Each structure stands twice: as C-alpha cells, then as structure tokens.
Amino acid sequence: MTLDFSGKHAVVTGASRGIGEAIVRQLDAAGARVALVARSADRLESIAAELTNDPLVVVADLSTHESIDQISTAVLEAFGGLDVLVNNAAVERNQPASKVTGEAIDETLFVNLRQAFMLCSAFAKPLFSSNGSIVNITSTAATGAGGTQGAYAASKGGLNTLTKNLANEWANKGVRVNGVAPGLVDTEMWEPTFDALGEDAVRTSFVKRVPLARWGTADEIANVACFLASEQASYVTGQTIRVDGGMTNI
C-alpha cells in the first residue's frame, strides 16, 4: 500500500526528533508539504534541509500560552489551509506520586493535553474545509501501568478520551480524529531513564513485558500515524491504535 499526500499540507508538533521526525519524513516522502513544529531551531532546520516539498519550520514552545497563535498564524499564512494535524509533542516528568510537584503535573497536562486540544481548536475551520484528519500520539502508559508516570499517564488517558470526543463532534464536518498509542519505542525520550537506571538494565528489564521481545522503532509508529492520516483510513475515526508489540495484551 502506497500512501499519497500530494498537494496536502500537514502540521507535526514535536518534529525535531524521534516519532515526530519519523512522521515528518514519511509525510514528506509521500508528497505532503509539512510544517515542522518544535523548540529546537537547529534540529528543525537540519531536518527541513533534507526534505523535498518546501517544508515550513515553526520554532515554538508549547509550554507557553502564546505558542498556539504563533503556530496557527505561521502555518495558515504559509499554507492557506490544512489537511493533517499530528499532535505529537509531549513532556514526561517521571516522579513518584508521594513526591510529585504541582509544577510537574501542571506542565505535563498543559503540554500533553491542553495544548493538543487548543491546536485542534485553532485549526478546526481549515480542517473542516479540507475534510481533514487529526492524529494524536498518545501512549500505552494511559492504561495506568506506568509506575511513577502518574501525570504523564493521566495526560495521555485524557488525550485518548479527547480523540473519541472530537471524532464524534466533528464527524459531521468530515474530519476524522484518531490516535496512536506507542509502547516501548527506541527514541531519545528514554535517555533520562537510561542515565538514571542504566541503559542495559532498562532495555533488558522492560523488553520482558513485550511478546514480540523487542523495542519498537519510530518508523513503526510513523507507519500507523501516516496510515490514519491518509485516505486509506477514510472510514476510521475515534480509534486509538496500540503499537506496542503486544505489551498491553498481557
């Protein structure tokens, strides 16, 4: 199956690394013009230089209120409309519930849930006009099995619920809303955990929970995200697909 995004315009947040970067590259390869959104200008410019469809770099910090207007204004001025929104940006503050800070909870819920919701709202009219698609990158942590990931798990659980709600609310506008819930994926997001507990120990311990007996890759998550964003998934909405090697089957 070959996906075709020729003539389409897409926004991907958290585009400077990991899953976001993989999604950007796949959308571009399939013909989309992509707006790359993240805080790291250097990394965004480096990725954009390797793309082929006149990408747009938007340097923005989603932990700030003003970032929503900043992103939507830049994208709509450059593109004039929008076909695909991928909410991938996220923060994780791994703290035991007995020691968690209000600041950590607020930041996690703000970036991972509130700002994803606000971007959906900011781009609602352009997506209505194009019968567009939204893909939210959630997490298998939303099942509540993440140990000291309470705030992160809650934010992703909220994003799963938001995905269903928007899918139902906007179906009559022709907009599809779906989610992808990654499990263990080998990205830079794990580096703080590797530094704290030892990379070999973490990799060996965590992979025991995965029936396929390996970590996933960013490209494997991007494959599903781009499928859901495409016309190939034209009758799919309100779904969150777990891409976790079977981990949540256990």
Image (tube, rainbow, N blue to C red):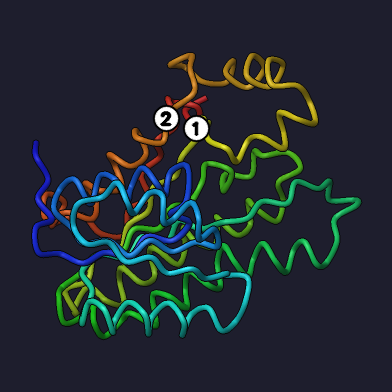
Q: Amino acid at mark 2?
A: Thr
Above or below residue 162? Residue 28 is above
Quadrant of the snapshot with the N terminus: top left
Q: Residues within 10 Å of mark 1 (few under 14, many from 20)?
A: many
Q: Which mark, by number, is residue 185?
A: 1
User: Which of 143 and 113 lies nearest the eye of the viewer?
Assistant: 113
Q: Which mark, by number, is residue 217?
A: 2
User: Which of 61 and 229 lies nearest the eye of the viewer?
Assistant: 61
Give the tally of numbered discs: 2
Residue at image point 36% right, 72% down: 166
Tell me where residue 10 appears, x and y as whole percent: 26, 64
Q: Secondary structure at mark 2?
A: loop
Q: Is residue 221 left or right of residue 184?
A: left
Q: Residues within 10 Å of mark 2 (few under 14, many from 20)?
A: some
Q: Amino acid at mark 1?
A: Val
- Mark 2 or mark 1: which comes first in sequence? 1
Tell me where residue 191 appears, x and y as whole percent: 66, 34
Above or below residue 225? Residue 242 is above
User: In which image quadrant can residue 101 be found?
Assistant: bottom right
Q: Is residue 178 left or right of residue 4?
A: right
Above or below residue 231? Residue 19 is above
Alpha carbons under labels 2 and 1: distance apart: 5 Å
Mark 2 and 1 residues: CB-CB less than 8 Å, in contact? yes
Q: Is residue 156 left or right of residue 172?
A: right
User: Which of 36 and 183 lies nearest the eye of the viewer?
Assistant: 36
Above or below residue 3? Residue 199 is above
Which residue is most to the right? 99
Tell me where residue 155 appears, x and y as whole percent: 60, 59
Residue at image point 33% right, 42% down: 222
